[in-house]
Amino acid sequence: MNLWGKRNDMVVHEREPFNAEPPPAALTGGPAVALTSLDAFFSRNHGPIPDLDPAAWRLEVDGTVTRPLSLSLEELRTRFEETEVVATLQCAGNRRTGLTGVRPVPGETPWGPGAISTARFRGVRLADVLARAGPAPGTAHLAFTGADVVPGARPPQPYGGSVPLEKALGPEVLLAWAMNDAPLPRVHGAPLRAVVPGWIGARSVKWLRRVTARTTPSDAYFQTTAYRLLPADAGPGRTGPGDGIPLGPSPLNCAVLSPVDGSRPPAGPAQVTGYALGGEHRTVARVEVSADGGRTWRPADVDEPAGPWVWQHWRTVLDLPRGEVEIVARAWDSAGTTTPESPAALWNPRGYANTSWPRVRLRCGPG
């Protein structure tokens, strides 16, 4: 096993902080398969992974509430109804390499298509805990604060971010202590993490220590400065807190998992597989795949959604000609939105939200 109990073939972008994605084959699912094994689940971290004692740990619930709470893990388990949700978590920088092919994105992790994974999380609803605390009039946001201190933040601080109260009250938003029917691994936020389905993974704060009701969004660095979509012409020293568009709900996205980019398969019939994610409150309605760079298209078989917050795998068979081949894919969601063709139109200085057609370039030998 590799670091933190991960597969030996994980693509480790950084060891400290630990940032790693699985190889595409680890995400390829058969019909109706949704869950990612714990040893293949991607890891996105901003600072050293804390080692917390579950027996001494407590969750503080404060801010604009009438009854501040201080809860142990046992109190969370016994005072609130347990529930679970299957959710796909996706880093906002997933598929960043598609944007770095347009222009460099300095200082950011070069994620391929594997900064996304799906798990069954178990815990309690954030809404139930908040109801016990009694949000005061004017409360509009819920801020999460983790125990991981981020040296690269300005200034260095614990990781944190917030979601609007309307989202926080959704029954799908959990305070989770289990993952795929196993105790939450330390690398994924033990003893407790937030799970915010349908939103960028950055809002599912790990090693959770505090939930704060607020009238305004969090003023943490990762809410006010990072995880914001900046204009293409923004440069160092030209942006500051509050600039750009804050990232929240996940957009429609699609990726090819097999064949792998740069591989040399034989010419002839080949199965092409991938995933698509519909985003907040939407499912994937259609996926089409092309073996000639987008001149002609073939429909793919798309799995039925395993839940409202879960990716859908797709597959089709294409006849690959000899020589250089470019496979591309495009998706539509249940609202009729489709993925854009060119990554050039989406490029931004931090390489977020690449939803353009995935492109896999092959050199096919004799069939």
Image: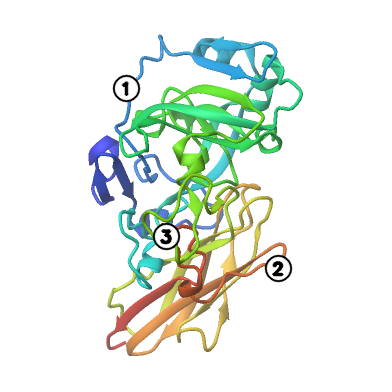
Question: Mark 3 and 2 residues: CB-CB less than 8 Å, in contact?
Answer: no
Q: In this view, does 81 lie above or below 197?
A: above
Which numbered marker is on residue 351? 3
Q: Which of 53 and 33 is in front in this view?
A: 53
Distance (Cα) linking label 3 and label 2: 25 Å
- Residue 286 rendering spot, x and y as whole percentages: 63, 69
Q: Give coordinates of residue 260: x percent, y percent.
A: 34, 69
Quick one: 84 or 315, which is closer to the camera? 84
Residue mark closest to the camera, 1 vs 3 = 3
Quadrant of residue 366 within the rendered picture: bottom left
- Residue 68 in the image: state x and y as whole percent: 62, 12
Q: How far apart are marks 1 and 2 (CA)?
A: 45 Å
| Disc 3 secondary structure class | loop
Q: Mark 2 belongs to which amino acid? A: Gly
Q: Mark 1 points at which residue?
A: 51
| Residue 268 seen | no
| Vertical side of 307 occupied by 134: above or below | above
Quadrant in the picture for the C terminus: bottom left
Q: In this view, does 71 lie to the left or right of 42?
A: right
Dot 1: what SS? loop
**Which of pointers 3 and 2 lies earlier in the amino acid sequence?**
2
Q: Residue at x 33, y 25 (%)?
A: 50
Packing grade of label 2 (10 A; few <14, some 14-19, many >=20) is: few
Quarter of the rendering containing residue 95: bottom left
Cα distance between the residues tagged 1 and 3: 31 Å
- Residue type at mark 1 is Asp
Q: Name the residue under label 2.
A: 336
* Quadrant of the frame with the N terminus: top left
Horizontal side of residue 196 vs 292, given as left or right: right
